[in-house]
Amino acid sequence: MDTQLKRGLLEICVLATIKNEDSYGYKIIKDMKPYIELSESTLYTILKRLETTKMLTVQSVEHNGRLRKYYHITKAGLQRIEDFKSEWKEVIAVYQFVIKEDEHD
């Protein structure tokens, strides 16, 4: 899969994971695991990029004597999910066109 496409899809998946509830790194990985395998290093790179682009905010909270970072989706992050849903319809149309050619073989 194209690296840029995969990166964008993983960003959307992370945003979707925290859409309804703030979460932290380990839980995000755990929640995504049934669908997508994601390493910690990849996740934290994505989270940093999403924070930089203002699609999420971070709050440190003490948990069992340690600080845990909780990630919260912003309006920009929610809008990115909605934009993705609209854009994906175009991708599906292209895919259907491509496989239509295969059906004629």
Image: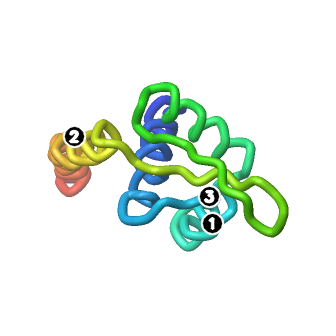
Residue holding disc 3: 24
Front-most of 39 and 103?
39
Residue holding disc 1: 27
Determine whether label 2 and label 3 are within 8 Å by CB: no
Q: Residue at x 45, y 58 (%)?
A: 18
The type of residue carrying mark 2 is: Asp
Q: Quick check: can you spot residue 91?
A: no
Alpha carbon separation for disc pair 2 and 3: 24 Å
Residue holding disc 2: 83
Figure check: 76 above or below 39 = above
Secondary element type, mark 3: loop
Q: How many residues crowd mark 3 within 10 Å: few (<14), some (14–19), many (20+)?
A: some
Determine whether label 1 and label 3 are within 8 Å by CB: yes
| Residue furthest bottom as drawn | 34
Q: Quick check: can you spot residue 9?
A: yes
Q: Which numbered dot is residue 14?
A: none
Secondary element type, mark 1: helix
* Image spot of residue 95 (x, y percent): 24, 46
**Count of all numbered marks drawn on residues in the image:** 3
